[in-house]
Amino acid sequence: QVQLVESGGGLVQAGGSLRLSCAASGMIFSVNAMGWYRQAPGKQRELVVTITGGGAANYRASVKGRFTISRDGAKNTVYLQMNSLKPEDTGVYYCNANLQGPFGNEMDYWGKGTLVTVSS
């Protein structure tokens, strides 16, 4: 079994910064990608950014230049540095891990989420 543990959410004023962390643990054979999704109240969950095992990142257009994802492969941990935060960045941020099993099967895992609130 695989567990994802997120940390780093909180309340910040517009223009401020927060850093999220997500550590994956358990039976991890290979990591295809890890990333962050968010869900604002009354809205669907949306992609924020993903990073592949090779380090290629894919950002949502609205966060480019403000958010930076990084990874520590040895620790199966990803970090999300969020700068110049805006009220529209408010939501529950979920960590996702897309893993490759030993028999070539893909598996998706989700964290429980961490709340980010940006006040205007």
Image (cartoon, helix red, strand yellow):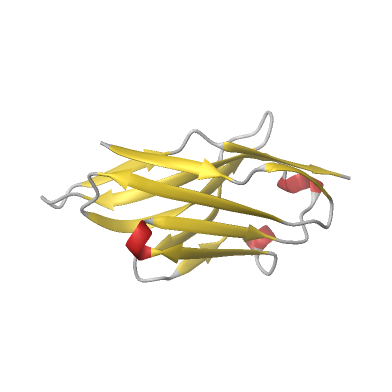
Q: Residue 100, image x and y in percent?
A: 23, 52
User: Which of the 4 quarters of the picture holds residue 109?
Assistant: top left
Q: Is residue 86 above or below residue 61?
A: above
In the picture provided, is 32 more to the left or to the right than 29? right
User: Which of the 4 quarters of the picture holds residue 44?
Assistant: top right
Q: Is residue 38 above or below residue 112?
A: below
Residue at image coords 56%, 44%? 7
User: Which of the 4 quarters of the picture holds residue 76?
Assistant: bottom left
Viewer-side residue, 18 vs 106:
18
Q: Residue 104, image x and y in percent?
A: 15, 52
In the current view of this chain or complex, which residue is farthest to the left?
103
Q: Residue 56, image x and y in percent?
A: 43, 70
In the current view of this chain or complex, which residue is farthest to the front?
75
**Quadrant showing the N terminus:** top left
Q: Is residue 58 above or below residue 18?
A: below
In the current view of this chain or complex, which residue is farthest to the right?
120
Viewer-side residue, 88 vs 93:
93
**Quadrant showing the C terminus:** top right
In the picture provided, is 40 more to the left or to the right than 106? right
Residue at image coords 59%, 38%? 114
Q: Residue 119, image x and y in percent?
A: 84, 42
In the picture provided, is 63 more to the left or to the right than 112? right
Residue at image coords 43%, 49%? 23
Viewer-side residue, 119 vs 24:
24
